[in-house]
Structures are given as C-alpha cells and as structure tokens.
Image: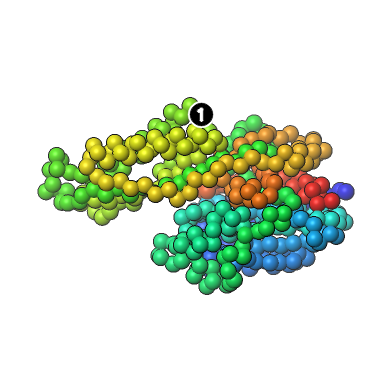
Amino acid sequence: MSLTIDRDRLSSEIDTLASFSDAEAPAVTRIVFTPTDLKARAWMKARCEEAGLTLRQDAVGNMFARWIGSDPAAPVVGTGSHIDAIPNAGKYDGVVGVLGGLEAIRALRQAGFRPRHSIELLIFTSEEPTRFGIGCIGSRLLSGTLSADAARKLADKDGDALDEVRRRAGFGGELEQVKLPIGYYKAFIELHIEQGPRLERQQIPLGIVTKIAAPASLRISIEGSGGHAGGVLMPDRHDALCAAAELILAIENAARNSGAIDTVATVGICDVFPGAVNSIPSRVRLSVDIRDTDLQRRDLVMRTLEAACNTVSTGRGVSIHTELLNADAPADCAPAIIEALSQSCRHHELTFLPMVSRAYHDSLFMARIVPVAMLFIPCLNGYSHRPDEYAHPDDIARGTLVLAETLAALSA
Ligand SMILES: [Zn+2]
C-alpha cells in the first residue's frame, strides 16, 4: 500500500481551524463550549462528513467520527486529540492529532485500504483545564476516571455548571452514558507536538512515547488579615501574600531538590484580595501543578508542600487550606502499539526517540480502558501554549504518515 499524505491540505486545514479564535492571530484562544469552540466543532464535523465518516457525539461533547470496518462488531482502533486551546495559545497543540488523524484516515481510504476493525477519530472535550479547572474532562468521563456525579459538580468561574453549559451548547443526554465499555477500543494512538525541545535539539523527526507523566493539582487558600497599608505596623501583620510568597518558593525548592530532572512544580495562578495598592492582602489563592513520571517522588513533593503550609501558617499566624483537585497516576504506553509505530518508522527509515511525555494528554486517561501510545513530532524551540508555537508541515506530514500506517497495521 502506498500512502500519500496531502501535506498542503493538512497545513491549510490547520490554518483554517486556527481562524476560529477569540484572540487575534497568530494567537489562538478557543475555550470549551464558547460560540467560537462550537463554530470550530461544526467546521470539524463538516470535514469528517466530507471524508465519509459516521459521526456521533456524547453527552459531554466528545466527538467520534468512524470509518466502519468490514467487521463492525470488532473493537475499534482509535486516534485523536483535542481542539480546545488555552488563552493566547498556538494552533498546533491538539489540532495536529485531530487533523493529522483525519488526514491519516483519508490517506488510507484513498490508497484503497479496507480496515477490518473500524477506525475512529476522537475529538475530546476540554483537554485544557481553562474553563472548569480540571483538564481532560472528556477522556476522564470516557474512562470512568471522573464520575458523572463529580462532573456535575464542576462549574466555571461565573458559576455556570458544566452540566448546564454542555446542554446549552447542544449536548443532551446523561453524563452517565459517556463512559465507554471496556473492550470498545482495541488500541488508541494520539499524535501530538512534543511541547518540549528534545526532538528538535537532537534533530530526530519522531518521538514514541513510552510513559506519560503524572500530574497533580492543588488549590491553596491563605487567609490572613487585611488592613490599611499605612495604619497597620509590621509586627502586627498577617499578610496573606507574604505567606504565599514563602510557599511558592518552598514548592519550587521541593521540586528542585527531588533528585530527578523529571520532577516539576509550578504555581501558575496567584489571586490576591483585595488587590489594592494601599491595602494589606488578606486572602490569596494559589493554583499548584506538580508532575513527575514517578508517583512516589511526586507524592513526596506534595508531602513537603503540606509541611511547608504548616510551618508558614504557624510562623505567620495565617490559616492555610489546601484542596487536592486531582492526582492522577502515570500511564505506561502499550508495547504492541509502540512496536507497530517503531516498525512504521523503520519502514520509512525515520529515526525516532523513545521518550516520556511530561505534559499530560487525554491518552493518560484513555490508558485506563485501552492500550495507548503517543507519537510526538518536533515543535520549534519546544514552545507550546503560546502564539509562536510552530510545527513544520513536513514534520506534521511525517507523523501523519506513521500514524496512518500504524492505524492500518492495527485495524487489519
Ligand atoms: Zn494537547
């Protein structure tokens, strides 16, 4: 079978999808269930229909576009990713896996391939945590990692419940029905930009992921006491922001001193109340993200953080409350899919790097119900989640080719 990937069509589709954005180009902002997201979904749907795929959407808006195999009852071979984008992001994160997956299917059809197992393109709802504070809502529900009850408790910062928002966006039915039965999928492969610099630095065209790092996120609320910036003297202060500053550095130190390069910790949000120049901060909320490929090491960082909260709370006379939002286990990719990807790389004489995914992806959750693997392509300077995120069309086409061939091998 000789496969032709239409590199230029794929590039132009990536550009078109990027035009559905709430930020000015080249930045892309596409938050789940906003009118812009719904327009992008409608455009995606039309592309899938054009490709002859059969569409289905579930109650949380996960979209499944299926090429029905000659044995429709056999477990499905899946591929896909997400199209939501954080504020001021780029146009490749997630999108490469969705449009690359679609192009892979089109290439296989055009080559006259006929799968025995159905092949399905899956577009996950809300991989990014922007709106509801938790990432991978679609794949968490599909895999049963997030219960329908817990999902119903999610709300955005305006207090709008996920359950309401998704219904208003046109996704009816019960969230209980989202979970997929074990055995629905035979295999799942996600094509993605690396979001790190290794492939580019080593000039290797492809990365085959062997392990996906485990993220944990926490919210920390610090309650001190406010007052007039002139009136309250230093010995009497219980400044919540100063307490937060100590905690932020303690978190950084805990990750730096873990003994492994794979440990990373970030405080990405710091909300200060009341936020006036002449008022002592009385309340601060921090959002913390800690990741590792090793669960025990990550948990040690979390215990160190807990100890720092106690020390700072006592030392400064502030109360500190931590809330664990999620703490997921890392996933191992499936050896059989890794082997199929490797074989395709060897067939095309493409070198590849076995690597760890330090960012998490929907595949992390899909791994609970189906053997998964991920295929990475280089991105410029490793940049991601920023407007200058860039992947070369040749790299995207190469990843798509290897994906297509692997889908063929697994679905035959
Ligand atoms: Zn992504």
- x and y, in percent, of residue 121 in the image: 70, 57
Task: Choose between 181 and 195: the one closer to the eye.
Answer: 181
- x and y, in percent, of residue 315 in the image: 23, 37
**What type is the residue that disc 1 sits on?**
Ala
Residue 133 visible? The answer is yes
Task: Choose between 370 and 34: the one closer to the eye.
Answer: 370
- x and y, in percent, of residue 179 in the image: 62, 60
Residue at (76%, 44%) from the top-left corner? 402
Residue 19 in the figure: left or right of residue 4: left
Residue position marked by numbered label 1 in the rendering = 260
State the colouring used for the structure image: rainbow
Residue at (74%, 62%) from the top-left corner? 66
**In the figure, 237 relative to 198: above or below?**
below
Badge 1: how crowded within 10 Å, few (<14), some, or many (20+)? few
**In the figure, 249 relative to 141: above or below?**
above
- x and y, in percent, of residue 198 in the image: 60, 34
Q: Which residue extends farthest top? A: 259
SS label for mark 1: loop
Quadrant of the image occupied by residue 61: bottom right
Quadrant of the image occupied by residue 53: bottom right
Task: Choose between 330 and 273: the one closer to the eye.
Answer: 330
Residue 9 visible? The answer is no
Residue at (75%, 56%) from the top-left corner? 76
**In the figure, 206 relative to 93: above or below?**
above
Residue at (63%, 68%) from the top-left corner? 42
Ligand 1 lies under 8 Å from the Cβ of mark 1? no
Count of marks, rendered view:
1
